[in-house]
Amino acid sequence: MADYQAIVIGSGAGGLSSALTLAQKGLSVLLLEAMPSFGGYLNPFRRKSYTFDTGLDCLGELAKGERFRKLLDALGISDKLDFVELNPEGFDRYVFGDYEFTVCKGKERFKEKLLKEFPKEERGISKFLQVLDKMAQAVEAATSMAAGPVGTLKFLLKNPVMLKYSRVPYQKLLDEVTSDKRLQAVLSGYCGTYGLPPKRASVMIALEVLNYFFSGGYYPRGGSGDFRDAFLDALRDHGAQLKNKARVVRIDKKGSEFFVETESGENYTAQVVISDADPAVTLGKLVDPRIVPSKIQKKVERLRPSLGVFHAFIGTDPDLPSLGGIAQGNILHYDTFDVNRAFEIMSGSSLQETVPFCYITSPSLKDPQGEHAPPGRHTIQLFTFSNYSIFEKWRNAPSMKRGEEYGALKEKIGKRLVKTIERYVPDLSDHLDHVEYATPLSSEYWVTAVNGGISGPEQTPDQMGPGRFTSCTAGIEGLFLVGSGTIAFGITACVRSGILAGEKAASLLGSKP
């Protein structure tokens, strides 16, 4: 008899959601986490008196009845969480050199702002939003699409927008609706949230992200740690067992049981396994290759990871509200209207001399009562994208012990990143009460991100839909996948994958004698 009905590997948003979905049903669940702390990108860290998030900066669809709120309701944790709504008139700012566009809540309001800024582009703007609406309807319809070729054909006939755009890059749509490079920049400014330029990004992910934030931007009170703890408390209340410092190194299946082995030599058995590790890690490294179907092996081999990120975590003393440069929201800063060019530079294998893009946010401004910083001080978090190959020579060195050359490289890049945002916080370099930098190697170590890719497999047209593991299945009965390698990147998509996998696993367990 198996030790547990279900073992969940990894405690990111997908792992936590799948474990909780199963535990709510009274099933026996063991959650294994490799790191000392649970949460993956939901796990904050503390330095001096500052607390920094590592992956949560803005959420959407949280009003009553909206999609993400419904997911939290289904998990039974809505009443344990509280959110700060960011400024509905401008929760995101896209800055291109000297030009700025502020993103507001509501699609009609967004359209009004676009028409005011680009009065000659009314026809293109209207067409763009029509495509967005049709794509949103198709994505929603896809959740209930019948399986098999016939079901797929019926779906495509009813949703021709998917047939036209699902396999082409976002730039194709932009070129169809406008030749105005400034408008194209505004319509692609949020590419900085998922790490792909319009020339390479899937139309599906681009429109899905934009549509997601029409409902406004929100930040959890207390930061990502409080958000994560709502999951952990609920899991413990439902009797799930949680074990940290338990890195899984092997998954095998014999008969109807799975065998899971950790790095320390502990062995557990279960009827089903759900993995929150990247599919390339789960199916390419952890699962015994003898039980992975050849079709799945080939799919895994084709996966390409997303770009890595370089982070700066800053504790500082300037009075940020009085300066006005960083408000209760996020800034996506580009040094050019050419978003494609910015990503070409960041994707290069040589060290960039400039910082063509950076994402800027301040948790302490979003959540003033959240104790992110000591009184009178603030936290600022920045990131830019960076090619993994720049840091690859240190990949096998222990974390925090990669030597002086690595430290000097981090310092060099970090100073350039900090200098870039001094247009928003003047003389910030002279007010660094605490600063800490992290490279793609940090993501690789702490959350097992392939090549430090922050968004899982890159979301190009060939790696969306059938190119991902959207069904959360792995071709092995009883093995399920969750996280950014399944439906899409982002906390909401990962939670959706967790609930979907949890429901499928529960259904399978219910059918077993």
Image (cartoon, rainbow, N blue to C red):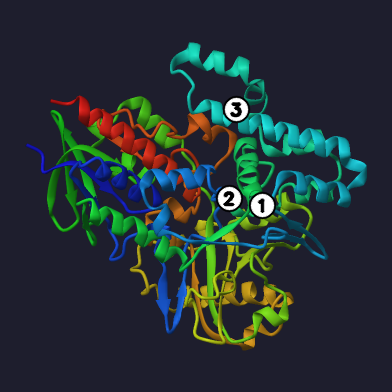
Question: Answer yes or no: do the residues labelled 3 and 1 have beta carbons within 8 Å?
Answer: no
How far is mark 3 from mark 2, CA to CA? 21 Å
Q: Label 3: which residue?
A: 138
Q: Is residue 363 above or below residue 88?
A: below
Q: Label 1: which residue?
A: 190
Element carrying mark 3: helix
In the image: residue 142, left or right of residue 47: right
Task: Determine the image quadrant of residue 485.
Answer: top left
Q: Is residue 397 above or below residue 459?
A: below
Q: Residue furthest top?
A: 150
In the image: residue 436, left or right of residue 401: right
Residue 289 visible in the displayed image: yes
Question: Answer yes or no: do the residues labelled 2 and 1 have beta carbons within 8 Å?
Answer: yes
Residue sitting at x 63%, y 84%: 429
Label ID, residue 502: none
Q: Label 2: which residue?
A: 194
The three-letter amino acid code for the residue at tag 2 is Tyr
The three-letter amino acid code for the residue at tag 3 is Ala
Task: Determine the image quadrant of residue 40.
Answer: bottom left
Tell me where residue 158 appears, x and y as whole percent. Answer: 62, 17
